[in-house]
Structures are given as structure tokens and as C-alpha cells.
Image (cartoon, helix red, strand yellow):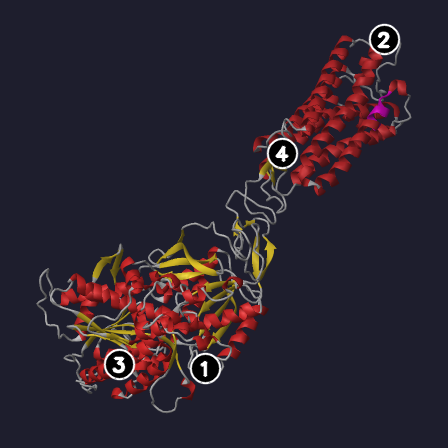
Amino acid sequence: MRRKVFLQIREGLIAPFKMQMCRLRCGLLPALMILSSVLASVGGCDFAQSVCGAHTPGDVILGILLPCHQKVNAIHERIRPETFHCSDFDPQSFVRSLATIHEIEKINAAGFLPGVRLGYLMCDTCSYASKALQNVVHMLAVNGSLTAACNYTDFRPGIKIILGAQYSEESIAVARLLNVYMVPLLSSTSSSPELSDKLRYPGFIRTIPSDIHQTKALAKLMSHYHWNWVGVVYGDDDYGKAAFDSFLRDAGANNVCLAYQEVVPHYLDHENNEQRIQQVAQQIRSSKAQVVLLILKAELVELLFKEMIRTSTTRTWIASDIWSRSSALAQMDGINRVGDILGFAFVAGKSESFDNYLRNLSATPGGYNHFIEEYKNLRFNCLSECFSSEPPSYCPSPDLLKIKSGNACDLKDPQEQNDDYLVTALDTSETFLHRVAVWATANALKKLLKCNNSSCSGDINFAPWELLRELKEVEFTYDNLNVHFDKNGDSINGYDLVLWERSGQQRRFRKIGTYQVLNEEIEFDGEDFTWYSTGNITAPRSRCSESCTGGSEKKILNVTCCYNCTQCGEGMYSEDPDPNNCKTCPSGTWSLKGWDHCEPRSESYLGWSEPHPIVVIAASALGILLLLVTLIIFLVYRDSPAIKKAELKLSCVMKVGMAASFVSVLCFLGKPSVHLCRARQVVYAMGFTLCVSCILVKAYRTFLAFVPLDHITSKPLHRLYRPSWIVSVLTSVQGIICLLWMIFDSPDIDDTLPSQQSMEKIFQCTEGETYIGFGIMLGYMGLLVLVCFLLAFKGRKVPQENSETGYIIFSMLMYLFVWVCFIPVYITRNEEGTIVQASAILVSSYGIIFCHFLPKCYEALRGSNSGPQPIRLRNNTTRGSRSSSF
């Protein structure tokens, strides 16, 4: 009844004004103002300010709850429940509402619901939650009022579903109210994670994912470009706070840290907005962070960008879904001076039929649309006085004047005009999910109303909760998109990654990737675009600390993204950049300080082909060759005085001992084994002891022959002179020492770990755990050498033609000197002990060759027939003389 009254009044009022507009084109604005004041009195609702400014009757009425204006004026001064006065017409939101209306008309024209016509009632929220609640009360009112009841199961309002709202702040408020009546609220833009809670919002459904997926995508995008130091600016509404809290969790999971976080009042007419924007801009300018995430309405982003342009500040801006496809921002003056812009937007898609609808815009036959009228007045009404330096107060804002057609003053009736401005100036593809919402409703209605190809048999006056039940189960395909809702009422169709690309003095949207909700991965279509910040395809940097390269780890300072890089220690490595901790090398491998990989240690030992071993081999071979040559000379000249004096048999035994010493040197070469470690020491000990025992016999013989002794001392000493027994006993003692050594503390492979600073595993022998056996073995030989030296030293005044004392003294001194030098070197340079001992054996062995064998060979070869006779011991006993032969 109320609607009929309104329509009659409206028709009676508009007719005379249409005639006046035809006559006085330039006086159209005052006429519209008069019309607005008259309509404002109807039912207490100001339709000129768009309480519910668009309607078309039908069998089933859909509510449309979207903003066509950006704000409510002077909301901070509101102290009485007066009419809300809206301002700042929003073309982009207006186009979204038109997309919904157009899709309803398409469904009706196609006969998708045979015999059932869909109608709509559209109300303007003015981007304000309280205004949205007022609209909902108006939509649900039956006979002008809402009746209180305990049970609303049979509540059957004229509006069966509400499509909207645009902002989460509004949807949260409206959904709370609608919970009482279980009227479904289907949104295509409200993405707050809070709305997924079906305990609090059981009637809310949306054709978009929850912001928990968007914030994951944002964090992964930052991680992909290695941006770990970012700033965040968000609104203080429910959408902004919920999205920020969700981003905090995802940022931490992707090693992204916040350089700062700033909150801006979401209400556009807030008295402190300008001051707060300037404070935020100052924080952005002073921060080291080059990447800024903006979780704000497009209108607030515009205010911030204007401040950035004024101060020539460039950053890389990350857009949340609420403004990532904002055509108004993409066309604002100076937009190319703010820096790079990219972000995630909901799935979009063009519709040629919708674009044609916008080119031929008019209200649905049988209905009205005040928002279309307002748009056409802004676009085609001549307001030349508004372009003067001092425009009248009733003129639109400078931004809205940009909508004005260039030939507006040449046109007669603005309401009869059309052009392609909305198609060319705005991004109509972003209305895709609004169209999907209408089709989701239509598919749910088709099932609820039991429609077939010819008719629908269900009751069209159903309760809204019945439609909600069917809507939750709906599943269909629209324009290659599979549409269904999860248990939280959310869609999982993912996001488009959009780059704001330069296009002259404006920006255009270029899709460069997608984010798949199910696998939580960003799929890039290509990264061959040029960044504004760097001038090439290299992404800008935004880090608190420079990236740690491989071979180092992070030492966290005050926050996880701010750190110093320290090199990995020995045995540790890191192959990836920015590791939190270095990893331990796998078994059998090692690394040095600062390495980014591990590798097996190289094996180090005296290889046969290395320079030192070659010299040792040559020296051993030469020594054995000299022994062989001297043996031949001794045998050939065995009857010469020199050879007789040298005692051929004793000398041959010495040569055998020397040969064993030279052979033992070869056991020091090559990769050590347990058997080689034992054999080399035993062979050397026995061979050199045998040689030294023979030399001791010679020294003892000289001592007894030429050193004067008293009778008491001389007798027992002469009895002890038994050369073969002396050699055998002394050598056997060394054999016993070696046997006990091999049994109780035998040599083995040294299993001592290499130095941490070394990549070489030194393979060498260890002469037992305690080195006692090794020490006794060397000590025993040293004792024999010392005895030889002392005996020879005592007989040093013996005539040289009858004695070898000089040679014995020199060779024994050489041995003592070599081994006295060997011991400290062996102890302090254990890794070089092998080559040192081998060299010591060679030097001491060559000392005996040069002192004992070569001089005799020289004398024998010289052919001296008259030489000294072999030494004979003085016989002080009655048993007769004892031969000195071996």
C-alpha cells in the first residue's frame, strides 16, 4: 500500500519537472533539489539520498545492499536518529549494483525459472554499517513494520535474500541482525575471516574466499620476492583489524616482519582523517621498509597516495582485495609517481552483454532506479558554473566533475542520454562475482521452487531460511567457474595476482598470476614485466638486513628479520640464503668455516708417487745397492789386510742388519695398515739392533785389546768377550722387547680425528696407546749405541792402523745426534712423524755405511799389501788365546 502511494506521488511530481527540464536545461539542478525535498517527506525516507532507490516488482524479490555513495555526511555530529545524508557518488560500486540488476533481468529474459519473475529492491548503504541496518529493517518490514516474535520459522517477508554488503564492517552488522530471521546474506566482496564463523553468522554466504587465504597469498608473495621488512596500514573497521591479525600470523610463518603498523579511521568523514593520513605518510617516508601493505578502502588509499605524490615518495604498494582493481585510483592524477602497485583481486571476467547494457543504460521497465538518474545527471547535466574558480556549494566534488561528459551542455534531456563511459573508464570485469551471486540464488530457487523446463510448482511465498538451506548445497558452473560453498559458506575460487601497469598517465590492470586456495601456491604467468623502482625486471628490495649467503647463518637481533650474518663453523654448512641455523655435515664429510657444502676429507699419507716418498725410495734403493756392492768387494778382497781387519763374517752380519733397516723404510710408505705399522718398527728394531750389536763387539774387542786393565777386572771382561753370543743375546733382548710391545701395546692405525681446520684425514700409524713399547725399543738401541760410543771413546788413543774407534765414534755420534733431533720433532709434529722417522733411519744407516764399509772398500781396492794385522786380544789366562772371529 505504501509503495503504491509513493509511486502515485512520484508520478505526479516528476511529470511537471520533466516538462520544465525540456524547457530550461540549465535550471535542471534546482528542479531536482525541489523534487528531492518533496520525496524526502514520503514515509520518512529520503529517497533522493537513496534509502532504497531502485525497485522492480516480481514474484520473488531479491534485496540488493550495496553502496552507491562513499560516505554519510557529518556522522560525527549525529546525536538524533535523523535521516542519513549521503554524498560522493561512487561509480565503481554503482556499476556493481547494475551488474546484479542486469543479471536478474537476464535470468528473467531467459526463462530460467519458468513462470517465476525475479524482482529486486536496492538500497544504498553509503558505506556505513548503521545505514545498512536501516536499509535491512526497511527491506524486511511487513506492512511497514517488523513484528516481535519468539519464533520466526513462518516469517515470510517480501525480501527473500539480500545480496551484499560490500564491506565486511557492514556485512558483520547486517548478518547479526539477519540471524534472527535466518534471511540469507550473500556477499561478493566482504572477505573478513570473522564471517566464516557459522556459530555467529549462520546465514552468511559469499562467492569469494575468506581473507585467511588472501593474507596467506600476500605473505607468500612477499616471501617470493624476499621482502621481509614491510609496513602495514589498515583501517580500524572489522575488515581491517581481522585481515591485519590474519596477516600477522601468515607473515610470521613466511619470515616476514613488520617495520611498522599504522591504523587509519575507516570512516571517510572522520574529523582526524587528514591529520592521521599525514602522520602515516611521515612514518612511511621515515622507514627503511620499501614495501607497504594497504588494507584500506580505496577512498583512504587515494588520500594517502595524494600525500605521497605531494612529497614525491615512491614505494612498492601491496593492494588488498578491497582496492586492487580500483579504477578510480588507477586514473587519479599522478598515479605513476607513487611507485609499483600489485595485489590480489577476486576472480574477474568480462561480459559483453553487461557492457552493452551499460552503453544503453535505463531503469527496468515497470520499476525505477534513482541511482541511474543521479549518474546521468552527473554525466550529462550541464553545470558550467561548477567549473569556475568559485563554484556554488551545490556542485559535485572535483573528482565527480571528472565524470562530466565533454558535450553535456549540448544535450537536452540528461535522462535520455547514454554513452560508453562506464565501460571505458571502469573495470567492468570485477563485477563477475556479483553476477555469480545472482546465478547462485537462481539455482537455489530453481531447486526450492521445484522448477522444470516448463514451470515451477513450489510456493513462491516461502520462508527465507528455506532458500538458505538450498543455497548452501548449490553447485553449478558459470563461465567455466565451478561454483559451490564450503562448510563455512565460503567459495574457494582463488585470486588473481594483478600488476598495475603504466598506460600513459594512468594505470591498467595486468594479470600476472593466480593464487590457488587448495594448494596454497602462487602460479605466475610470467615475470617479464618492468618494475618502476628498479627500471628493469629485477624486483625491488625491502629487507631489514642484507641476505646471508650460503655458508653463514643468522644471529637474530631485536626481531627475526634483523640480524647479523656469521659464518658457519667447522663441520657445519648452509646452502640456502638466510638460514636460521647451519646444518651439521653428514657422516663421512666435513666442511671448513664459512663453507656452503660438505665434502669427504681427502686422505693424506706418504703415497708412492709423491716427491718425499720418491726420494726415500731412491735413498733406500741406493743404500741396499751400496750394501750389495760392498758385500761383493768384501768377498772379492776377503784376503786383503783391510777386509781381514774388518772381520768379514761380522761385517756380513752388519750388512744384513743394514739391509733390514733399509727395507723397513719402505714399510713407512703407502697407505698404512695395521700389519705395516707393526712390521716397519719390528724390522727396523731387529735389523739395526743386529748391526749395532756387531759394532759393539768391535768396540769391545778394541777396548779389551788396548785399554790397560788390572788383573781382577780384566779376567771377567775377557770371559765375556764371545762375539756370537754377544750379538745373539743383544739382538734377542730387542726381540723380546718387540714381542712384549706387540702383545700389550702394539702399533695401530691412528684414529685421532683431524684438526677441525683441516680437510685432510692423515693416515698414519700410532706406536701404541702409551708409546711405552716404542720408547723402550728406541731406548734400548740408544743404550747399545751409547755403550759402543763409550767403549770406542775409551780406546780412542789406540793407533789408527790397528783400530776402528774413530769410525765407531763418528757413526755412533751421528746416530745419537739424529735420534736426539728426531724425538722432539716426532712429539711436536706428530703428523710428520712418519717421514721424520724414515729419514732418521736412512741417515743413521748411511752413517754406518760411510763409516764402516766404504773406507774398508777403499783400502781393499787401493791394493795395499802391507797393512795392519787383525787385532788379537792379550791372553792373561792359562787357557791360551781366544780368537776374535765371529
Residue at the image position 73 percent from the left and 39 percent from the top: 825
Q: Earlier in the sequence, mark 1 or mark 4?
A: 1
Q: Earlier in the sequence, mark 2 or mark 3?
A: 3
Residue behind mark 4:
605
Q: Residues within 10 Å of mark 2 (few under 14, many from 20)?
A: some
Amino acid on which disc 4 is placed: Tyr
On screen, residue 445 above or below 572: below
Residue behind mark 1:
392
Amino acid on which disc 3 is placed: Ile
Q: Earlier in the sequence, mark 4 or mark 3?
A: 3
Could you say whether the residue bearing mark 4 is in a helix, strand or loop? loop
- Region in magenta: 803-809
Marks 4/3: CA distance? 108 Å
Marks 2/3: CA distance? 153 Å
Residue behind mark 2:
863
Amino acid on which disc 1 is placed: Pro
Nearer to us: label 2 or label 4: 4
Could you say whether the residue bearing mark 2 is in a helix, strand or loop? loop
On screen, residue 251 above or below 413: above
Label at residue 127: none
